[in-house]
Amino acid sequence: MNSTVATPAKPAAATRPGSPVVINEDANHELAIRVEDLNLWYGEKQALKNINIDVFQKNVTALIGPSGCGKSTFLRCLNRMNDLIRSVRIEGLVEMDGRDVNARNMDEVALRRRVGMVFQKPNPFPKSIYDNIAYAPTMHDLVSRRADKDDLVESALRDAGLWEEVKDILDQPGTSLSGGQQQRLCIARAIAVKPDVILMDEPTSALDPISTATIEDLMDKLKTQFSIVTVTHNMQQAARVADYTAFFHMGELVEYNDTKTMFSNPNTKKAEDYITGRYG
């Protein structure tokens, strides 16, 4: 008598704390960022507690969890944006290419070129569309000749899916664009300096559904070139765009898993309760 046995999900190849519970066979697993025993305090209040996670190259990793659980705080740890807050104290390791990004001799400007950020609310510079893209590469000496700047601006805007909409108005202010266009302009600005990682802090929360869908499609295309870590409160969005999902709760990383597994068969009761809407 023949019987069909379901094939179990493949567990993580490694057992270190930062590994996902289940491996996504279709995802790349070269390491982009390794985080070990990361703790963060705002004054006396601890906001992150013993975070361990491996972020893989050329994937979308979504951070989910209720408001105030530490998602955005963690995201800002990856390019030291929390350094701008005086009361912050950090312990633990955030490592890229074998180097601790919090080391005293780490060049923060160089780090933020490699780990770019797109914020919740579009924030174009008070400059032309062209200069929004060309400014940072020029400051970092990535380009100097006008022809090279022109090529870079076009390339970044094409990668952000915005070129055809703005190619004839490059001298107009970036703030003259619609909200969705402004956010794509900010993405183009981030990728113009050729980063390794792009951080996105709820990049579509202020956008209409059509603009949101455009940004989600863009993320899927961009992950072939960049590693993307995104914070989202939209469960459907995480399920659509992410290869891996990390669930935060009260400053702790409760579960890190293949996204399909996370939303169909989470490994923890807390993650299941959040995903099914029992709290949030």
Image: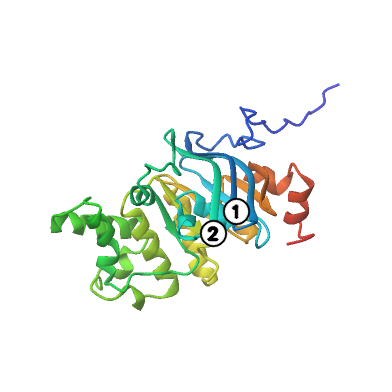
Residue at position x 53%, y 72% in the image:
208
| Camera sees residue 231 | no
Q: Circle 1 sits on which residue? A: 41
Q: SS class of the residue under badge 2?
A: loop
Q: SS class of the residue under badge 1?
A: strand
Q: Circle 2 sits on which residue? A: 87
Residue type of the residue flagged with mark 1: Trp
Residue 212, position in %: x, y?
Answer: 51, 65
Query: Where 191 falls versus 243 (above or below)?
Result: below
Q: Nearer the viewer, residue 177 or 55?
A: 55
In the orientation shown, which residue stands out farthest toward the bottom? 176
Q: Tell me, yes or no, whether the two marked residues, 2 and 1, touch with CB atoms within 8 Å.
A: yes
Quarter of the figure with the C terminus: bottom right
Residue 22, position in %: x, y?
Answer: 65, 36
Q: Quadrant of residue 238?
A: bottom right
Residue at position x 42%, y 44% in the image:
224
Quarter of the figure with the N terminus: top right
Query: Where 207 falls versus 83 (above or below)?
Result: below
Query: Where 37 falls versus 252 (above or below)?
Result: above
| Camera sees residue 197 | yes
